Image (cartoon, helix red, strand yellow):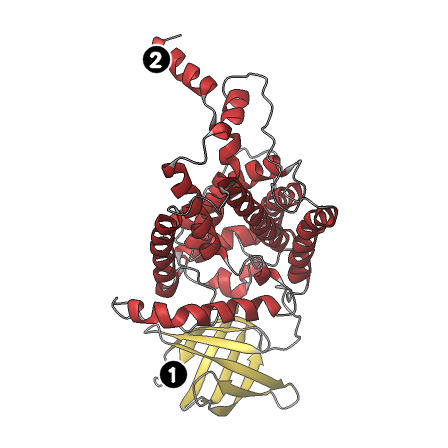
């Protein structure tokens, strides 16, 4: 073995991360900085996982608290500040400004806090931070894992997605589609996250849970960064949380996994909540958090389509039309429609059909909404629409396509493929 490798192994063997003197100034600063950083970054989690929209209300309240500080700083950038309502994006300019403020406040707060050495026990600070991160990571793993296991996160492919131009998809939409195409793979990825959350329930198995969560979150972070999914901040925070939980056991894991030595994990029993009543709190707290995550998932509406029997449903392409229409594609799901014109403009809204009169009452998605009536004539795969759609006259002949009967959705699974196709 090269001398350099022997020296590295010797250093690793002698490393004592668990015996670092918490009283030294640098360690005192990093311990308190990490505590402030993680608490300010994650709060109000894991309470945002509460069901019956309670979690959403709590998250909204905390966004409102940050708004007076975030808004003036966000105004200095070229990006518009989104309202505090949940938009589905975790990478808005408000989120980035807030994270920058959290880092700044944590640095200043940890510097000032480090001068106080008598009343604060840094071992307790570290243990409280680890306990909080364990509950937060547990909640996230159970919630997102259950979302995938019950196929509530990535919707299955439908006529609209299959008929859209491949080049018009966003990178995030592309990732959502390949995950939605295979419910089995989505459930497999969800099971890894769910098992990691279950292992985090008990302190005895929390190391295994954190290690599995680290592997799962590494994959999630890579996907979010490579496909520009707008939850990069959320994923990175959870990834760093797994690193913090694993840090005290790094030496032991390196010795066991890389050096193939017998190793014993350090005792990380918390130094707080040591009474008999606190014993039950430590046991029931994680279980309560996990149960709330599962209940929140099960209370979400299903992504499966509601079957509506009507001729006014499907994907259609224009084959003939009046010059004032200029449609290219029409997608209808039984209650809402979206038409794309030749210049890329989209017309959308909701509708209700009268099968006896072969008419459709359309309500545009504009503000204020415009009500109109369209009549249809159906013959085979063609459909003619005549009337008004919104405030524009409509006269178009459409031909129905059936993307669900295409190669992708009918390909199936093959153990043997003499001529593989990667088209």
Residue at 46%, 44% (x, y): give it.
118
Between residues 118 and 337, which one lies in front from this camera angle?
118
Mark 1 in CB contact with mark 2 (< 8 angstroms): no
Residue at 68%, 41% (x, y): give it.
202
Measured in 3D between alpha carbons, the distance from the residue under mark 1 to the one under mark 2, in whole angstroms, is: 74 Å
Q: Is residue 250 visible?
A: no
- Select label 1 or label 2 by which is in front: 2
Residue at 49%, 35% (x, y): give it.
247
- Where 329 falls versus 415 (above or below)? below
- Where 261 falls versus 24 (above or below)? above
Instruction: Look at the numbered disc 1 and give the secondary structure of its residue.
Output: loop
Q: Is residue 252 visible?
A: yes
Between residues 396 and 333, which one lies in front from this camera angle?
333
Between residues 2 and 405, which one lies in front from this camera angle?
2
Neighbour tally class for label 1: few under 14, some 14-19, many 20 plus, Cα within 10 Å: some
Q: How far across and down, in percent of the image, does residue 91 sit?
A: 40, 59
Q: Which mark is residue 325?
A: 1
Q: Quadrant of the C terminus?
A: top left
Relative horizontal placement of residue 39, taking residue 131 as reference (left or right): left
Total marks drawn?
A: 2
Relative horizontal placement of residue 286, taking residue 229 as reference (left or right): right
Instruction: Look at the numbered disc 2 and give the secondary structure of its residue.
Output: helix
Q: Which of the 4 image quadrants contains residue 68?
A: bottom left
Q: How far across and down, in percent of the image, does residue 194 sit?
A: 63, 46
Q: Which residue is mark 2?
A: 4
Q: Quadrant of the N terminus?
A: top left
Q: How far across and down, in percent of the image, does residue 415 sit?
A: 61, 34
Q: How far across and down, in percent of the image, does residue 389 sit?
A: 46, 87
Instruction: Mark 1 or mark 2: name the one nearer the start of the chain.
Output: 2
Q: Which of the 4 image quadrants contains residue 104?
A: bottom left
């Amino acid at each position: 073995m090269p001398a350099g490798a022997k020296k590295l192994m010797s250093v690793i063997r002698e490393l004592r991360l668990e015996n670092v003197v918490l009283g030294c100034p640098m360690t005192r600063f990093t311990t308190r900085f990490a505590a402030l950083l993680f608490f300010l970054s994650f709060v109000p989690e894991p309470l945002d996982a509460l069901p019956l929209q309670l979690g959403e209300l709590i998250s909204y309240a905390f966004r409102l608290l940050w708004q007076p500080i975030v808004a003036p700083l966000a105004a200095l950038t070229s990006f518009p500040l989104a309202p505090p309502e949940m938009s589905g994006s975790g990478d808005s300019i408000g989120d980035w400004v807030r994270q920058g403020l959290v880092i700044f406040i944590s640095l200043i707060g940890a510097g000032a806090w480090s001068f106080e050495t008598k009343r604060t026990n840094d071992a307790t600070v570290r243990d409280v931070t680890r306990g909080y991160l364990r509950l937060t990571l547990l909640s996230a793993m159970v919630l997102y894992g259950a979302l995938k296991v019950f196929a509530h996160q990535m919707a299955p492919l439908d006529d609209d997605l299959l008929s859209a131009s491949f080049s018009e998809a966003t990178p995030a939409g592309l990732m959502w589609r390949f995950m939605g195409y295979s419910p089995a793979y989505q459930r497999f990825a969800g099971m890894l996250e769910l098992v990691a959350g279950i292992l985090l329930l008990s302190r005895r198995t929390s190391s295994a849970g954190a290690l599995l969560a680290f592997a799962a979150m590494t994959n999630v972070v890579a996907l979010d960064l490579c496909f520009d999914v707008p939850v990069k901040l959320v994923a990175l925070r959870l990834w760093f949380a797994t690193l913090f939980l694993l840090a005290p056991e790094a030496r032991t894991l390196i010795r066991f996994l890389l050096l193939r030595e017998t190793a014993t994990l350090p005792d990380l029993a918390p130094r707080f909540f040591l009474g008999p009543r606190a014993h039950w709190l430590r046991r029931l707290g994680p279980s309560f958090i996990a149960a709330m995550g599962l209940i929140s998932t099960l209370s979400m509406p299903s992504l499966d389509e509601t079957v509506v029997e009507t001729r006014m449903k499907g994907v259609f392409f224009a084959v003939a039309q009046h010059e004032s229409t200029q449609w290219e594609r029409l997608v209808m799901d039984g209650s809402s429609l979206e038409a794309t014109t030749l210049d890329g403009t989209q017309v959308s809204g909701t509708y209700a059909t009268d099968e006896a009169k072969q008419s459709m009452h359309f309500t545009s998605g504009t503000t204020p909404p415009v009500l109109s009536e369209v009549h249809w004539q159906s013959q085979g795969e063609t459909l003619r629409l005549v009337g008004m759609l919104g405030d524009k006259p409509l006269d178009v002949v459409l031909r129905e396509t059936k993307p669900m009967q295409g190669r992708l959705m009918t390909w199936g699974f093959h153990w043997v493929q003499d001529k593989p196709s990667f088209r």
